[in-house]
Amino acid sequence: MKMPIPDYLTEILDHVRDSDGGEVADYIPELAGADPDRLALALCTTSGHVYSAGEHADVEFTIQSISKPFVFALALQELGTDAVMEVVGLEPSGEAFNELSLDDNDNRPVNPMINAGAIAVNQLINGVDSSVEERVEKIRDLFSRLAGRELRIDGGLSASELDGADRNLSIAHMLRSYGIIRDSAHDAVRSYTDQCSILVTTRDLAVMSATLATGGVQPVTGERLLSPEACRLTLAVMSSAGMYDGAGRWMAGVGIPAKSGVSGGLIGTLPGQLGIASFSPRLDSQGNSVRGVRMFELLSHDMGLHLMSADQQSVPGVRSITRDGDDTVIRLQGTINFTAAENILHELSAHNLGGTRLVLDVSRVTSFNRMGRRMVKEGLRRLREDGFRCSIFDPDGVVTNLEFSDGTLVDTVDVL
């Protein structure tokens, strides 16, 4: 059976494709010439299944500010929370990402998602006495392992950004004047700019964000890269400050810890479930991808992904798959949301299904959310196209009137 998830992601892309709001980041020469019509979407489950849509899903672009949460997690991993908190706070700023401001009480940057905080955190990596080259290599190596492939730095874009880095240089001078960083302002900004110039794809970002969702285990390779504590604190900061001064509206409406970048990338992480990434270069006034924001809004609504939603339960979905004569019986359990439905469809795809009839037993299912119902129905439709007769055992009427797109209903059976 062909998985229906890429088709759903394509529907999301088609829904936002004609939106032409926003502008590319023209204050960075290398980004000013970006193709504004590029569009891609990908997600990676905590079980390591990666799905993508859009012809630009494997197109490389610079990670920019999406690098901030991962470097923050690396600093926490290397030094511990107390040491990192000596140079950066955890509070939302309510200000632009490149504002020259520090906390009035202790002169620290208020959080690691704005530029002042990110520059301060960057300087902790590999020790405060590290060279720029060694520090950047430590970051590049982690990002490569997070993505599951070797990543590289776009030297041309880094040089382009450095040529116009007056604002960040001012921030670095401010940090140095208060003893937050030791490097020269130029070296600090060079190190931070190289961090932001690492090239990634939309698929890379989905896998990287899913690593935060697992508590630090790269879901495809199985390698532990970050501690659960570092991931938990990183996601907490993303939820409160990842979308800059729009973070409150984002969490209220979308409800997914997220981080944006001015090259058009956007990531979201749902703990214990999945990582999501989108790519579309047109930005709004806050520096967030216009079509990316809309894609996340649709995904959150359709899939029930809001962090504060009662749907947020991670369950296996499949209880058992057994053969009884000519029937294969698939027994489900728990609440069937997106994560459970994806697991169900993946297990069915991997299972050597036999016989001529498939019976879906939902007697132990407590409920289906909208996306869980849609995905299970689509899976049954595709299995029917593969030649199976599909029936459902639903004594409590959990999924009454399960209808295919041609108007026919799934057969029901009274007993198993």
Image (tube, rainbow, N blue to C red):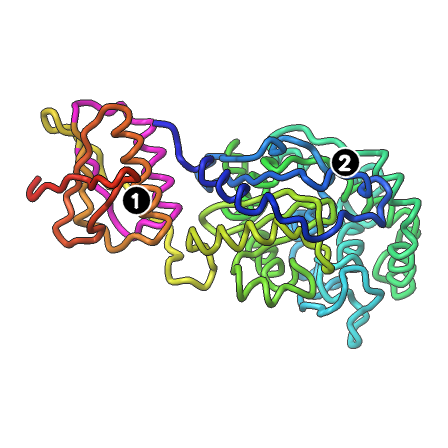
Position of residue 205 measured from the top left corner of the image (x, y, whole percent): 61, 40
Position of residue 78 measured from the top left corner of the image (x, y, whole percent): 68, 48
Mark 2 crowdedness (10 Å alpha carbons): few <14, some 14-19, many ≥20: some
Q: Which mark is residue 233?
A: none
Is residue 35 found inside the magenta-colored segment of the image?
A: no
Is residue 334 found inside the magenta-colored segment of the image?
A: yes
Query: On the rendered structure, is 193 left or right of 59?
Result: right
Q: Which mark is residue 137?
A: 2
The residue under the point 53% across, 46% down is 15
The residue under the point 62% across, 60% down is 237
Nearer the camera: disc 1 or disc 2: 1
Name the amino acid type tagged 2. Glu
Position of residue 188 measured from the top left corner of the image (x, y, whole percent): 86, 49
Position of residue 348 measured from the top left corner of the image (x, y, whole percent): 30, 31
285 over 161 or under it: above or below: below
Q: Which residues are magenta?
A: 329-356
The residue labelled by disc 1 is: 317
The residue under the point 90% across, 45% down is 162
Locate the N terminus by quadrant: top left
